[in-house]
């Protein structure tokens, strides 16, 4: 079975996960989308996918675009740091 088949969002309106802004009503929408992610049994798989080959837009794995951007940057820095330590 594909992890997406078990996703809580599969029963929701997809537009909920693609807010048009990060303020005002967009923040309410983000909060509602994250609440769905909070009760989802495959949130970690979704986030892993979103951090890898997934799209930048929308709420995926309980994170927003900017939150995933920060996670990607941190992950890249950690990898670069580890590579530098092992190269010595």
Image: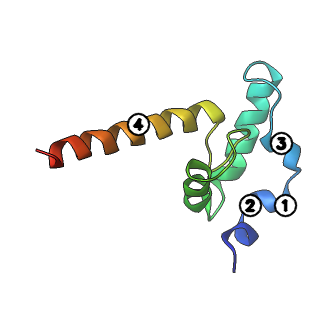
Q: Secondary structure at mark 1?
A: helix
Where does label 2 land, which residue?
8
Q: Vertical placement of 30 versus 83: above or below?
A: above
Left/right placement of residue 80 relative to residue 35 reads left
> Which residue appears farthest toward the left when viewing the image?
88
Q: Which residue is mark 1?
A: 11
Residue drawn at (85%, 54%), measured in percent from left and top? 12
Label 4 to label 2, Cα distance in Å? Answer: 28 Å
Ranked by sequence position, the earlier of labels 4 and 1 is: 1
Label 3 residue SS: helix
Decide which of tag 4 and tag 2 comes sooner along the chain: 2
Nearer to us of marks 3 and 4 is 4
Distance between the alpha carbons at the discs numbered 4 and 1:
32 Å
Foreground: 22 or 40? 22
Real-space Cα separation, disc 2 to disc 1, in angstroms: 6 Å
Q: Which disc number belongs to residue 43? A: none
* Residue linked to disc 3: 16
Dividing the picture into quadrants, the one containing residue 2 is bottom right
Q: Earlier in the sequence, mark 3 or mark 4?
A: 3
Q: How is the image coloured?
A: rainbow
Pick the quarter of the image with the C terminus.
Answer: top left
Q: Is residue 46 left or right of residue 78?
A: right
| Residue underneath mark 4 | 74
Drawn side of residue 65 relative to residue 33, left or right? left
Mark 2 and mark 1 in contact? Answer it, CB < 8 Å: yes
């Amino acid at each position: 079975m594909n992890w997406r088949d078990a996703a809580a969002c599969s029963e929701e309106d997809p537009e909920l996960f693609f807010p048009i802004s990060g303020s005002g009503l967009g923040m309410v929408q983000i909060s509602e989308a994250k609440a769905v992610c909070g009760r989802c049994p495959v949130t970690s798989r979704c986030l892993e996918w979103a951090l890898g080959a997934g799209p930048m837009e929308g709420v995926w794995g309980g994170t927003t675009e900017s939150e995933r951007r920060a996670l990607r940057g941190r992950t890249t820095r950690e990898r670069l740091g580890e590579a530098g330590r092992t190269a010595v």
